[in-house]
Amino acid sequence: MIKLILTTTALTMAAGVAFADSHSVVRLGTEGAYPPYNFINDDGEVDGFERDLGDELCARAELTCVWVTNDWDSIIPNLTSGNYDTIIAGMSITDERDEVIDFTQAYIPPSPSLFMGMDDGITLEGAMIAAQTNTIQAGYVATLDGVTLIEFATPDETVAAVRNGEADAVMADNDFLLQIAAEDDDLMIVLDPVSLGDGVAMGLREGDELIAAFDAAITSMKEDGTLNALLVEWFGDEAVTW
């Protein structure tokens, strides 16, 4: 279910794509629990890379946007039900998801998924691996022979499972895990990286004309370098860029 509408941003910059009155207010749906992609700051507002990106895209497309938070495990059903207009929540493009919703072009290039644990000698044979429900990482772990997948509703729970010994490692996006490993001496990146998905993009209802507006805005950010600058700002100098 939708949990909270956090803020309204009325944005009208000259550069952008004029849009139909049928979308006078565009609701941007995010999780708010996956830093640095998206999170809730101390003021109770959506923050992170995708907050900055979404605001800029709305400005370029001359759209008035509001931010909405929704639990990850129901984020696609609540989009298709009409509870908000887009998903901008670190969602990778996959064939399975593309059967249910449409995607813009990617705003984050494909990047590896990583494993994080507390023992650099871990092997996958017989391992218990934590992953967030309905993610590409959970789907991948489920295909591995001799590996037990433990699914959790939130990213924080997957990391907690490693810390308390419930799981041998967690698998998630590299930018999420690298930040945590850098701040905790007990946690480290283990095993080999795995390439999954076709990049991170906005998800919209099938056939929604908003796709063209956001695609044009993403293209303009790629062309003038502001998207790469934003990626480096939030993910560091080693970020995968365009």
Image (cartoon, helix red, strand yellow):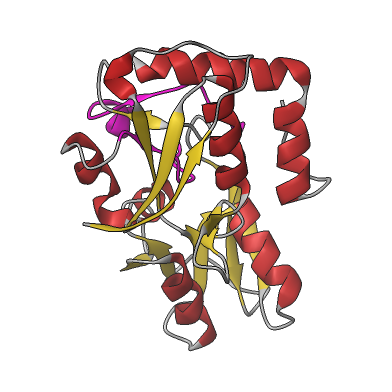
Above/below status of 89 relative to 219: below
Nearer the observer, 7 or 112 = 7
The residues colored magenta run: 85-109
Residue 70 highlighted magenta (yes or no): no
Q: Position of residue 97 (x, y in %)?
A: 30, 33
Q: In the picture, which quadrant includes the C terminus?
A: top right
Name the magenta segment's main secondary structure.
Answer: loop
The quarter of the picture where residue 151 lies is bottom left
How far across and down, in percent of the image, does residue 37 sit?
57, 51
Residue nearer the viewer, 151 or 183: 183
* Rendered residue at 64%/53% (across/down): 175
Seen as rendered, the residue at the extreme right is 237
Q: In this orientation, does residue 94 appear?
A: no
Residue 167, quarter of picture: bottom left
Residue at 42% across, 84% down? 166
Confirm whether residue 240 shows in the render. yes
Judged from this view, the residue extending furthest toward the left is 81
Q: Identify which residue, 31 or 185, lies in the foreground.
A: 31
**Looking at the picture, how far across and down is residue 108, in whole percent?**
60, 34
Name above or below for residue 168 compared with residue 86: below
Can you say which quadrant of the picture contains the N terminus?
Answer: bottom left
Residue 119 picture location, percent across and down? 64, 79
The residue at 77%/42% (across/down) is: 232
Q: Say whether residue 3 is left or right of residue 190.
A: left
Residue 22 vs 72, above or below: the answer is above
- Report whether 83 appears left or right of 191: left
- How many marks can you see? 0
Verify whether residue 106 appears in magenta: yes
- Specify whether 110 is left or right of 87: right
